[in-house]
Amino acid sequence: MSIAAETPVVPKVNLLNRLLAMVPPALWSVIVLVVVWELAVKVAEIPNYVLPAPSAILVEFGAYWHRLLPNAMVTAGEVVFGFLCAVLIGVPLSVFITYSRFMERSIYPLIVASQTVPKVAIAPLLLTWFGYGLAPKIVIVVLLSFFPIVINSVMGLKSASREMIYLARSMGASGWQQFWKFRLPQALPSMFAGFKLATVLSVIGAIVAEFIGADKGLGYLILVAGSSFNITRQFAAIILITIIGIVFFMVIERLERVVIPWRHRGPSETDA
Amino acid sequence: MNVMPAPRAMNSAAESYISISGVSKTFNGRQGEVHALKDINLNIKPGEFVSVLGPSGCGKSTLMMLVSGLLPVSTGRIMVGKKHIDSPNADAGIVFQQDVLLEWRTALQNVMMQAEIRKGDLKQAKERALQLLKMVSLQGFENSYPKELSGGMRQRVSICRALLHHPPLMLMDEPFGALDAMTRDQLQIDLLRLCSDNDMTVLFITHSISEAIFLSDRVVVMSPRPGRIERIIDIDLPRPRRLAMREDTRFIEYTRELTQIFKGLGVFREEY
């Protein structure tokens, strides 16, 4: 496709270009993937219990909608709530780490250690402690997603240059003002990079938690469908999980554009 | 030509605006103490434009930081006006080599930061901010973000910011060092105009011989390791200064003399 976009102007190609431009590039790759997938399954006559065709998955969506949607809502709830908890824990923690050498030296190793522990390994433990409800899911989501939030926030808060802080102090800025008016806005782009990483990890966390022990959610549906070899239903659930992840990521990205608009304004054609 | 040795006695302390007496500064480096400045004595009259000229590592930036109060002296005493400098001097306006503009604020908002921190009359400050931006030919760019401005425009915004609160003292640390030669020429002229309009004392740090001569009433020559004042040279050129004066015989004489001093100090070695 990009080849077509770069081809010199010939009327016919121009028409193709315009056709391509009507649909976002990301959608094109999905369309191509789906078409190739459908054709491959049909041509090679792959049975549904090995690899269902997209059309079969679509039929499954229609037939099983009443169960898929509520379970998707459960998983989405875990993802979003867990993510928010991770932000509420991670951002203040990063402020402490930035401002206190003691905190940095005492807590940082602990945070790194918390990441090296495989979440799947401690999940049964969490089950024993918190049961089958929402709590263990939130704990696992937080454990997975707060790491990039803390790491990126600390990096952002430390990215204010020495000159910037000198400048603030020469204006007579208090420590509080130095934080709110200089350090925090300076840190925002880096913080959002962490948030975006965390959205993806939140989805993984929620599914892992549901695998370990749950009675609802898409992860639970996948397990149940797997035990009855319903591959089509598993694919339907996987696609829903992907959609949850993509939508959540896009929401955070949109929020980023609202919170830090200066980042997305391109350079104008000025030259002094 | 009016050349005099560094004045050890403070005979003119009474009429001076800045008086630096017996000031030394040592840093605790990894290899023990580093003497950045040793036994500095300097008096600057109100309204005077003084450049501190020297090679890198001679402590000239440190000297500015001490006068600003952002770094404490190790020994000695600095007075600005009637104030003993032992904390950041809020009467000063500071410009660094990096413009240190806040990326999330427009040109006008960057200038206004000075007033927001100082909690003055914001309406009046905004009027002055607009007027200052106009004086450096930035009308029409008030609402541009820093990333939309060229290097020279950005540094002009940072100069306006330093001037907003009518500081009686301007401290400038190689403010034009990162700019191309032509932008530099224009900004030097802009600066001289702003100085004559605003009635300020300027301490200007530079490593450019011609820049020091062009701007200053006096040039303080420093030598490195440890940073000392080697010589102080009066620049007897009429004001307003014009670019053509750089071809003036007197200007060339000053250049030759300063070059000779640095050759004597081993800063320039011509044999190859």
Image: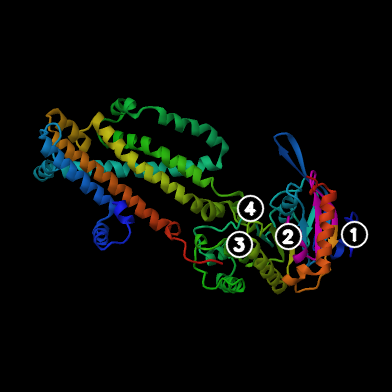
Q: How far from the left and from the top, in percent, is residue A96?
A: 51, 41
Which residue is located at x 55 percent, y 55 percent?
A177
Would you identify the image quadrant in which residue B169 lies?
Answer: bottom right
Using the numbered discs, state the Cα–Cα distance from disc 3 to disc 2 in whole angstroms. 15 Å
Which residue is located at x 62 percent, y 73 percent?
B135
Q: How far from the left and from the top, in percent, is residue B32?
A: 74, 34
Q: How far from the left and from the top, in percent, is residue A242?
A: 25, 42
Which residue is located at x 46 percent, y 43 percent?
A152
Using the numbered discs, state the Cα–Cα distance from disc 4 to disc 2 in whole angstroms. 17 Å
**Residue A255 seen in the current view:** yes
Q: Residue at label 4? A: A166
| Residue mark closest to the camera, 4 vs 2 | 2
Q: Chain of mark 1?
A: B
* Residue B222 is a magenta residue: yes
Q: Are marks 1 and 2 on the same chain?
A: yes
Q: Chain of mark 2?
A: B
Which residue is located at x 10 percent, y 35 percent?
A45
Disc nearer the start of the sequence (3/2): 3
Q: Residue at label 2? A: B204
Per the image, label 1 sits on a secondary structure element best described as: strand
User: Would you place residue A252 above or below residue A233 in this image?
Assistant: below
